[in-house]
Amino acid sequence: MIKVTDLYKKIGSVQALNGLSFQADNGTITGLLGPNGAGKTTCLRTLFGLLKADSGKAEIDGLDIATQTRQARTQLGLFPDPFGLYERLTPREYVQFFAELNGMAKAEASQATAEVLTLLQMNDIADRRCEGFSQGQRMKTALAQAIVHQPTNIVLDEPTRGLDVMSTRVLRDLLLTLKNQGHCVLFSSHVMQEVAALCDQVVVMARGQLVAQGSPAELCAATGKSSLEEAFIALIGTDEGIAA
């Protein structure tokens, strides 16, 4: 479970987070939806401890990311940019490196790596260098790194950006599998179809604040709109601010 309570973060002159609060539960996929500049990426970076909030609290399974950073991070899997892989490494080497980085002993990391490569059907490419990989192969390698240490929570920042149609479908299926296994999946996006198709809960953000939270159907019902896109526009007014 991921819980954010009254988070504030200023970056330069910009109030990136302005009292943001929401909760993402286990066994659900929660989407952060908002216009560019809404604070989605800042929120996720704060959750992973890459940024320190000015005030407020971010908790991972009840652990405060600010004061219990190391323990909290073990319960968190971060899906990185698939195009930023270490191309000289094989998926097996890459994934095992991050397993050990997350505190696993070498033998345990090796076993966990073998299991996740099998889970993601990667054994045919497991010992090839990542250089020259397709988008789908890169995406699977990045996801394997994120889940090898079996975190309760998976965090993704615009995960389908740059992926082709088939790779996007593979990723969606994998996220649904993680949800069905009881994981908490949290991802940011501004792609309405993606959020509507995947998310059990949607956190609508603008100007670093929570505008609304609910299922796509609940948000449509609350605004009297027939689609999530129309509901989103009704909720935030324009991409420049929050509707009155």
Image (spheres, grey):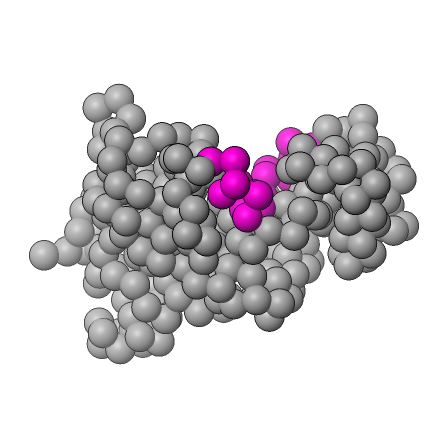
Q: Position of residue 25 (x, y in %)?
A: 43, 63
**Residue at (22% x, 74% y) in the render:** 222
In the rendered image, which quarter contains the C terminus? bottom left
Frontmost residue, 116 versus 104: 104
Q: Is residue 154 above or below residue 47?
A: below
Q: Is residue 40 visible?
A: no
Q: Position of residue 219 (x, y in %)?
A: 29, 70
Q: Quadrant of residue 102?
A: top right
Q: Quadrant of residue 8?
A: top left
Q: For residue 98: magenta?
A: no
In screen coordinates, is 80 left or right of 123?
A: left
**Residue at (31% x, 75% y) in the render:** 218
Frontmost residue, 238 versus 61: 61
Frontmost residue, 152 versus 35: 152
Q: Is residue 201 visible?
A: yes
**Residue at (47% x, 36% y) in the render:** 69
Q: Position of residue 226 (x, y in %)?
A: 31, 76
Q: Is residue 99 above or below residue 226?
A: above
Q: Position of residue 145 (x, y in %)?
A: 68, 43
Q: Quadrant of residue 134?
A: top right
In screen coordinates, is 92 left or right of 86?
A: right
**Magenta span of residues:** 69-85
In screen coordinates, is 60 left or right of 229?
A: right
Give the residue at the far top of this rendering: 12
Frontmost residue, 8 versus 197: 8
**Residue at (64% x, 57% y) in the render:** 171
In the rendered image, which quarter contains the N terminus? bottom left
In screen coordinates, is 15 left or right of 184?
A: left
